[in-house]
Amino acid sequence: MRPLTDEETKIMFEKVSKYIGENIRILVDRPDGTYCFRLHNDRVYYISEKILKLATNISRDKLVSVGTCFGKFTKTKKFRLHITALDFLAPYAKFKVWVKPGAEQSFLYGNHVLKSGLGRITENTMQYQGVVVYSMADVPLGFGVAAKSTQECRRVDPMSIVVFHQADVGEFIRNEDTLT
Amino acid sequence: GEQHLQQPTAEDKTPKLLHSLSKVGVDNFTMKAAVPGTEVPGHKDWVVSKFGRVLPILQLRCRKGNRVRTLKYDPSKYSHNIRKLDKTTADQFTPVTQLTWALPGGEDDISKKRRGEFPPYEPPRPKNDTIQLLRCVTLSPLRLEPIVHTEAHQFTTAFERPTNHRMAQKRGPHLTDSDVDSDEEIRRLVAAQQTSPGAQWQGLEDDNLEVVGFDYLVKQQKGNSGKRNSQTQGNSTETQSKKMTVLPVLKLPFSESDSDEDDEDDEDVQSADSSSDSDYEAMFSNVTCLEISLADLQRLAKESQPTSETPAPSILGATPKLETNLASSSVEQPAPKKGTLPEEILAAIMEEDSSEDEQKKKKKRKVVMSKLPAFQGTVALNEGSETDSCLKRQKKEDEGRGNAVRKQKLYSDTHQVNHRATDGKTSRCLSRQKLTGTEKKTPENSEQEEEEDDEERKKEAVRNMAAPNVLNMVLAKPAVHSEKAGPGSASSCDEEEEEEDKMKANQTVFIAKAAAKTLSSSCTEQGKDKQDDSAEDVVKTAPPPAAHSESSSSEEEEQAPRRVPLGAEEEEKRQRKANLRRLAAVQQRQKEAEEHKRLIRGALAKLVGAELVGPVFVKFGPSTLMELQSCFGVDSRFRMDTRFLDDDEDKEEESGEGQLHRYTESGPQTLPNVSACDIQKETKSVCRDISALHYDPTREEHAAFETKKESKAASKKREEVQKLPEISKEIYYDVSGDLKAVFGSTKNDVAGGEVKKSWDQEEKDESGKDEEPTVLSSLLWADPSAEKEASTGFKFSFFGDGTETKIDYKVESIQAPKVSWQQDPRLLDSSSEDDEEEQEEDEEDGSALLFPPSEGPKLFCRSSQLEEQWEERRKELKQVGISFQRNIIKSGLTMFTLSGTKPDGSLHTALKSVVRTTNF
């Protein structure tokens, strides 16, 4: 476990800020304690200082996970957001997409969101903007990337993709073994 | 095998056969009523097969190898094989030409393709054709041709879509496994999608799709359309943005969930409750705080006094129209004046309420205002706080605060509340207010609608409708409404309140508990005073509602049914009283709301440590105190204050935290896109990571750690430096010149060697000799420079302090040795000592001879070249030694006689000459 390098921090923050914008500082600058990011096994963990102190007692090779995994760095040094970060990012998300009840399951199986399944979308969502996907009952379901801007979404064919799937809560079951 | 069908009926024989067969009774090769297998009489090899058919027995010639066999095929024995054929023929006779390829619906694409007839290739048409063309139709009916065209192609497009859909669906999981999130990948995906036929759907805009604003709250009412949201949210952007930031962070102590799960929890609650619940929540989520201070209310009450003193209330007396149309007057009143009369305000509230109801009715929503569930947070708090002993104190404090802090315009606030509560129908409402006279419906109508709408209201109305006067009801309702709105709005703005409080707390220095108590007490006094004032005022105007007891509302309810139709004046009076009572009730509600807030605040202060310690941080280093407090959580026994702060702590940690600082400071640099993000704040509360504390030699700050190590090393070095010269002081070898020369000279000068040493040096020499082997050995292991010296010729300096008397080992001829062993060395004078010295020298030479040949030279130097020389020298020395000893013995005898005399130079020379003569 170690602090992120500048490069890693940059990559990760860029990714996270796609979803929550400047609210990212709220993650770090919290009134209820200090939280920080640590890298362990190529994964970035969001840890409170208290837990961090405790975790220092555990040797690196024995440590499986600490805090909340936000995502991992791929071999190509890209940061990939994990679904475990959803709880932290959803409240701060700027751009949201709501999927209709019929499309929920499809999304939770890892599929993209089609126009036909799109129930609601935040205005002025740009293309490739990171969005948090909600059900119509306002349950956060996962992350996505807007394939179309809001204006385009109004016009596109019902079968065209409007949100690219990034992560969904179905992964808690599907990727149970790899999620930490 | 090869089979030959032996047809017995040759062409010429056929008529014969037929004829003969017909004779037997075979008609058209069928013989009815004959058992299969029976032979046809008169015809060999003809049998009756199944269904009475007459068939020949076939004789098949079969060749196997060289042999040719004849197989008999009796058709009667295989009669079962042809049963089916018989059936078909029996049931329906179809000509052979129609047996195949004539399937029904042969014009299908599929059947055509089965036949192998493929249509000419046409490039796939984009899906949007149909819609586009439909549009064209609506726009210009002349263009009919394309429509037909598209209809023809709908078939194909219908097939295309599902496949495309499937593609899209399949693509998802596959790509998510890889790095989809990289922009390039996504762009590629989009490109792929756009090239797909269904991409350019330029169809009609979907009405299903909602587009919501940034500040769309997740908990918001679901039925909201985007437009109305945007309208309302334009007004309430501030509050919502505040909420957005605050909500997740804020930890309400009574909810056990994490801050992050707040949404979910709320969601659960929402889903669990009825739709009215969600409506309620949605209604108050947008609402700004209705902050009516007691002072405002008092002012309003006072202003209303003069009018109320007159027999006719202002509402009735204000406009002459009222006489004719009471209902409209009540409505019209607030608009032109925008006054501060409570009745007006209440009426306005009422009016808006009715309009809201109308709209709600249009939407066919059922929002039962009176059945709104209590704000859960405050309820929970209330329950929790009832155990609290300082409930009353807080209450009073609240009142005081409420008076002191909140002074906003009542009128505008009420309006805002209502506008937002009605879910963004502001524009309508406003327009209504402006155009009261013309556009408004009569309150009677609205009233009726309301009655239809919610039954609760109806009951209320019935109660208040004791008099035919509509005004009564109009006035009664606002009270109810405001009563309901009071806590609701308060609860909705609780979070805001808390935030404000926090802000205040942060800005102002934290006052200790005692101070807070004093403050509260003072506040209480103030509050009491004001309360009393208000109470007095109310008493002046109307005695019954003046009581601030909690049962006022209940009283009101009790009193309401008792009303009986009275005269107009009495009725007015009653109205006024009722108004005042309601005002009191509103105040009461307000107080309760304040109390709720206070309770929340108190609970938060109790349970959230940060809240408590917050103000102190500003003054005394935030992070440290927070850390300290975080160790103990919210335990009241361990409350950290400035006394626990250690000034040194920070300084100590600074060095260790440097790395972390680097990490946190790099935040702003690494956040190019995040504009407003100020990660510099991070540095304030830096996380101290012990694991990150390690010695970095490249960093200057860490030089502090190095000093001790260096000093040790330096001292060691110094010691070594100091030691080395000591060694050299004791023993000093200066080997100069060639060994050959040195030893060569020895032979020559052995006899007449002169002693140059002083007496005291001699003595030391003796002791030095003992040390010599060790010194030599050390010299051998020591630095090569010493070796060099040894090779150049060596000088011994024994105990030469500073002066370093160097003794060149010129081997000189030795005097005839005295018999030193007979004399006490102490008694010897220096001259005799010289002789002794010489003897010792000789002995040394002898001892050198005693060394093993290989070791001897090593003692002086290592170089292998010397060994040969040494060998030569050794031989020579041996001889010299032997002869020398011999001479000594000889001369010893002679010298013995001369003992006691001083050896002088003549003797030396004599000895030398002796040696020379004897040896060489």
Image: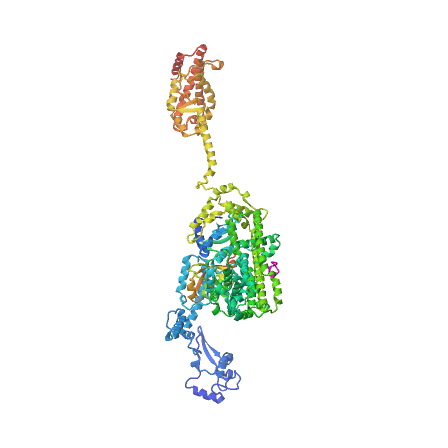
In the drawing, does residue B742 fall left or right of residue B368? left
* Vertical placement of residue B107 versus A95, above or below: below
Give the quadrant of residue B316: bottom right
Q: Quadrant of the N terminus of chain B?
A: bottom left
Q: Could you say where residue B578 lies in the image, as x and y percent from the top left?
A: 58, 64
Residue B786 higher or lower than B833, as above or below = below
As drawn, A68 above or below B892: below
**Residue B602 located within the stretch drawn in magenta:** no
Say which of B519 and A145 sits in front.
B519
| Apparent side of residue B555 relative to residue B428 in the rendered image (left or right) | right
Q: Nearer the viewer, residue B615 or A90?
A: B615
- SS majority, magenta: loop
Q: How is the image coloured?
A: rainbow
Residue B227 to residue B497: above or below: below
**Could you say where residue B880 lies in the image, as x and y percent from the top left?**
41, 19
Specify the farthest residue to the front.
Answer: B310
Residue situated in front as seen by the camera: B85 or B351: B351
Where does residue B135 sit, x and y in percent of width and height?
Answer: 40, 71
The location of residue B243, given as percent across then percent down, is: 50, 57
**Residue B352 makes an appearance in the image:** yes
Which image quarter holds the C terminus of chain B?
Answer: top left
Q: Exactly how many numbered labels are in the figure?
A: 0
Residue drawn at x 46%, y 18% is: B763
> Based on the displayed image, in which of its 4 quarters is residue B272 positioned?
bottom right
Q: Is residue B548 magenta?
A: yes
Does residue B118 appear in this view?
no
**First to last magenta residue range:** B544-551
The residue lying toward the viewer, choosing from B444 and B27, is: B444
Identify the image quadrant of residue B776. top left
